[in-house]
Image (cartoon, helix red, strand yellow):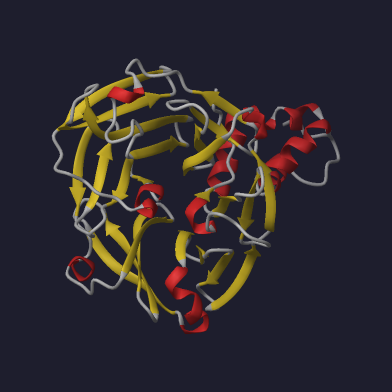
Amino acid sequence: MDNQKGALFPDEVILQILARLPVKSLFRFKSVCKSWYRLTSDKYFTTLFNQVSVKDQLLVAEVSDSSSLICVDNLRGVSELSLGFLRDRVRIRVSCNGLLCCSSIPEKGVYYVCNPLTREYRKLPRSRERPVTRFYPDGEATLVGLACDLNRNKFNVVLAGYHRFFGQRPDGSFICLVFDSETNKWRKFVSAIEECSFTHMSKNQVVFVNGMLHWLMSGLCYILVLDIEHDVWRKISLPDEIRCGNGGNRVYLLESDGFLSVIQLSDGWMKIWKMIEYETETWSVVDNISLRCIKGLVPGIFPICQTGEYVFLATHKQVLVYQRRSKLWKEMFSLKGSSSLPLWFSAHSFRSTIVPCN
């Protein structure tokens, strides 16, 4: 950036200020001067912006009676986003570091990766295999994952599930298709994995940490992990207390400031675990939160995303935030009128980043 003589602030101070603005404001300020116009494509600035914004978690949710998404920000409140620029009816399958992976509702096997803040998107090429021969039982992938690497400005999309040939029963093999944004191609590998089962929430809350994608198995047996670089599946153990604990507890897999985390819900408490040492699979309890203030909501509440400062949770019609330092609860959003699907069903963690899709 070319600093004008007599400017009030050095360039670096101005960049630090701009890096803390919403993405929409940055694009609106492009008309200020040539140097600001180039900011969103400048590698140094986009890296700085992403380093700042990645510390905050937002919540996005599809509202069934509207074409818009709601976006809930701990500091800025509630705003609306639109996926109308895709020119297709879609549903969000997964989110990672500011990108969304969406599948077409009218047409099976069509996927988009987009940044709803910059309105950039890429329609993924179709894989060579016919959908009806690929996944069991209905041609749709059991697992959909998105891994967005902010350091390399690249992403991978993963589709995985049990395989069957046309007109035959599933053969027991676990097929995985991986899209690479750098090559714009799919690759395929097949593994022998014992039968896996997932709830809707455990499929939704895929976590990208340490270059790996993580899914929580239903039954709380273990965490299923995909090493994208080496095309290898493996397992991570849950804390002993969860694996051997009360079957009445509900457990959710999330990220916490770059670490793998699980949240354990009981009738009166929300316990937050963090994997403090990934290589040795060492877990530690970092918070134990009373749910007494929201006791009536506990049976239908679901944690969606978190940082070290707050936790976003969704109910059938509400989004709540718990401030971990002040220990206060606040309603951030309430859905008016009737809705066919609860908010938690379509809620995802989100970040405000400048990541190119094309």
In this view, which residue lies farthest toward the front?
A: 167
Residue 215 visible? The answer is yes
Q: Front-most of 65 and 326?
A: 65
Question: Which residue is found at the position 62% from the left and 70% from the top?
Answer: 331
Q: How many marks?
A: 0
User: In the rendered view, would you say 95 is above or below 339?
Assistant: above
Image quarter hosting the C terminus = top right
Instruction: Tell me residue 278's x, y (percent).
Output: 26, 52
Q: Nearer the viewer, residue 124 or 306?
A: 124
State which quadrant residue 239 falls in.
bottom left
Q: Is residue 166 above or below residue 49?
A: above
Task: Examine the rendered structure and indicate whether residue 280 appears above or below residue 146.
Answer: below
Q: Position of residue 115 (x, y in %)?
A: 58, 35
Q: In front: 311, or 149?
A: 311
Left or right: where does residue 241 sit relative to residue 32? left
Residue 81 placed where, x, y %?
Answer: 67, 44
State the residue at coordinates (29%, 59%).
275
State whether residue 230 appears in this view. Answer: no
Q: Residue 140 or 218: which is nearer the viewer?
A: 140
In the rendered image, the quadrant that contains the N terminus is top right
Query: Hey, which residue is sitting farthest bottom in the picture?
Result: 292
Q: Position of residue 127 (x, y in %)?
A: 37, 19
For image coordinates 28% across by 23% down, the residue present is 133
